[in-house]
Image (tube, helix red, strand yellow):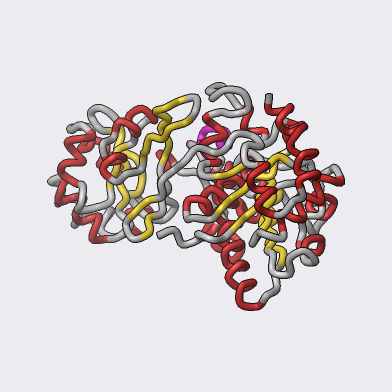
Amino acid sequence: MRPLEGIRILTLEQFGAGPYGSMALADLGAEVIKVENAATGGDASRHVGPHMLGEGDSQYFQTFNLNKKSVALDLKTEAGRAAFRTLAATADAVVNNMRGDQPEKLGIDYASLRDVKPDIVCLHISAYGRDNERKGWPGYDYLMQAEAGLMSMTGEPDGPPTRLGLSMIDFMTGITGALGLVSAILKARTSGKGCDVDTCLFDVALHQMSYPATWYMNEGDAPRRLPRSAHPSGVPVQTFPTADGWIFVMCMTQKFWLNLVAGMDRMDLADNPLFVDMAARRTNREALADTLDETFRTRTTEEWLAVLSGSLPVAPVYDVPSAFANPWLDTVGMRQTIRHPAKSDFSVLSSPIKVNGVRATAHPASGLGADTEAVLREAGVDPETLAALTRPAAEEVR
């Protein structure tokens, strides 16, 4: 069961935030059509190396665009705008992740499109929003991590401010936008009136500050970096060295703490006044870490996992090769192999969402402009306009 089947979404998107969010919608059954300018090479991520899949395609691009179609249109031309408006009349939504000053200029906001479809929903994912003095600024994930304070909280205390390992603000912004979009589509279907939906990288980055932000705004309690990725209040919640690597332990409750010391055969620690409850352990976190380090170093990570898994939250600290050698990925179906024209055994990650216990089947994203003729013809673009539009697109693809 694909819950969004029958919903058509047009996207004007590049790189991470927009494509990640719209791919989640495509996984759930929406028909997602990327509108790309063939003259400029389409989505810039088609050309991101080092692992290419032929001309105008890459493994990076496929990562964010599975299950999507591609229509080549240049919205800066009269013919391109006309064809886009004809196509928009058949769509439920239009999505973009451009600078905040671009949607109005290109005619892809609700005010510009409501005359062709009153219930259309327009999602705008920008760097800083469309209603402030920064609306024309370009921006990327890493900048948001820097300005919102996330980098100040990441890394070891004696190291420099550190970004997260991946563009998680892009991904969270994409999912935030997708939630807003689906919610607005539901409302539009009952009210007959569409709207603009906005989110931006900066707002989402700041919102991810969550409880440290609440603590600081109300108590002036500024978060600080703690050794070994430790939690600010839960103790012990951090990494520990084993005989051959590292393990992450999360004793977020007293029950888990007691299960830990029982599994380590260190019940003497349960009654130690320095560690008797969470408040005491927080006060004496360094002494507790030193004490637990000695015991954790006596066994390998796998040996500790065999003892502790299931009785408290623990996990091995893997590098990427180890993480993808983990048989659990295939046990739960989080990896699948698809046929790409340039690679018949192309491995991709599966959708993290199951519907009735089933994950979506992935298909490669279309080549640049590959669906132009079929989609525009079905939308009602007249043959003469269609011929004029597809001829230069085909030339660019070659």
- The secondary structure making up most of the magenta span is loop
Q: Position of residue 27 (x, y in %)?
A: 48, 51
Left or right of 308? Residue 395 is right
Residue at position x 87%, y 46% from top? 78
Residue 291: percent from left, percent from top = 25, 41
Q: Nearer the viewer, residue 199 or 153?
A: 199
**Residue closest to the eye, 116 or 308:** 116
Above or below, 62 relative to 257? above
Residue 243 located left or right of residue 346:
left
Image: 191 above or below 248 = below
- In the rendered structure, does residue 164 fall within the stretch colored magenta? yes
Q: Residue at x 32, y 54 (%)?
A: 281
Q: Residue reaching furthest left?
A: 265
Q: Residue at x 53, y 54 (%)?
A: 25
Q: Is residue 185 above or below residue 75?
A: below
Magenta residue span: 156-165
Instruction: Let me know if residue 288 appears in the view.
Output: no
